[in-house]
Amino acid sequence: MNRLARDAGLLLLTAAIAVSTTLAWRQWTRPAIVSAEKQLQTRQRLAVLPAGSYDNQPLDNPLPTPAAQRPASRVLAAYRATLTGKPSAIILVTQAQGYAGPIVLSVAIATDGRLIASQVVEQQESPGLGARLGDPQVHWLDQFANRHLGDHWALERDHGDFDQLAGATVTSRAVITALQEALGYFDEQRGGLLEGAVDE
Amino acid sequence: MNRFYLLAASLVSLLGATRTLREGVAIGLCAVLTASLHQLLLTPLRKRLARWAYVLASLLLLAALLTCLQLGLRAWLLPLAITLGPYPLLLCLQCLAVDHLLPEQGRWRLLATHLGAVFACCLLLGACRQWLANITDVHLANLAPGALLLLGLLVALYNRLRPGPAHPRRQGKL
């Protein structure tokens, strides 16, 4: 009985130390985690803009996104990049349904409606197939640069202009549709996105 | 006998998180850090606790250690933490197996050998996979099954090149 009580006491002590250390550590690392996440998000979303093409902090002033729900995707956020006070590009963050889960893309669109670049922010596609979407070695997203809404936004097998990602038809179609819908959204909301609220 | 089980216990993280040399170094360091800290924390408890309480204490300490490790990775190396995925947390399997398999005698020496071997394997796999994927464009090297094949090849190569008479185990006979 004595032995059992001693074991239980020692175990409780261990548990108390383990839990309190973990909680203290969590409290201590929280500010660093929050700022690291914010930094990463900023970097991912702004990676679509060429360096030097803007001089403001686009993410500090999100634009209103009316009618954000598109048929196959959803515009989560919109930001305006300006250079010497004039709008140089609009960044749309859009979410589409991929093969295994949502795909979140950051899309930069020039003021003339040309797609500047796009980048994956979040995805859960199959490793080695759909997940190669944002792989810098595959350059798959690069083929959409400088395209307009007027192009044939479909895979070659669907009589469109674009190569598909090998072994990932569903992912490829989802991304192409999302990019097309982002360009469509820009076209539709152009006035509000480019002029709208004047920067202070 | 124990040595082989020990290496097998580290297989999950070894195969899952060694896509590049950088990842290999990171997961290797995490493995060395967690396994040695876990053993260090358990040393004062081993003699004092009954078996059931010892197992519970070991689990509690392990959970605390790995939570702290994951939080630390997210705070200071967030991009790396995202590419490593759940594998730093799966190091708990390795720590539990190590604690179970290490003998009473010569515990620390064997642990040091084992962790050295795991770290070397992580570095070697990371370097080979990065090289295969980038230079020779072997896409399979990026995936976990490719890592298993590669590890098999490396073990075979090691057995072939290792000097001295081959142990029956290394000749593929029982």
Image (cartoon, rainbow, N blue to C red):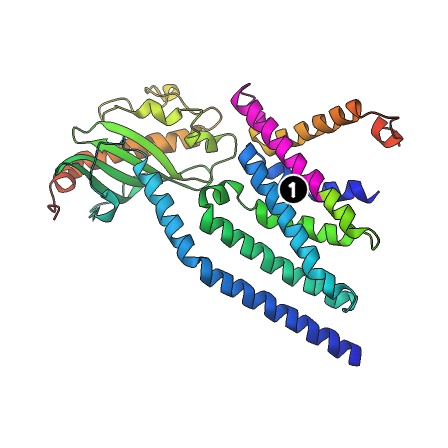
Q: Quadrant of the N terminus of chain B?
A: top right
Q: The residue marked by circle 1 belongs to what chain?
A: B
The crowd level at tag 1 (other Cα within 10 Å; few <14, some 14-19, many 20+) is: some
- The answer to which quarter of the image holds residue A154 is top left
Left or right: where does residue B172 sit relative to residue B152?
A: right
Prevailing secondary structure of the magenta residues: helix
Q: Is residue A140 above or below residue A103?
A: above
Q: Quadrant of the C terminus of chain B?
A: top right
Label 1 residue SS: helix
- Please provide the residue range marked out in magenta: B115-141
Q: Which residue is mark 1?
A: B12
* Residue B158 is at least partly visible in this image: yes
Q: Is residue A111 magenta?
A: no
Residue B49 locus on image (x, y percent): 76, 69
Q: How many marks?
A: 1
Question: A29 and A49: which one is in front?
Answer: A29
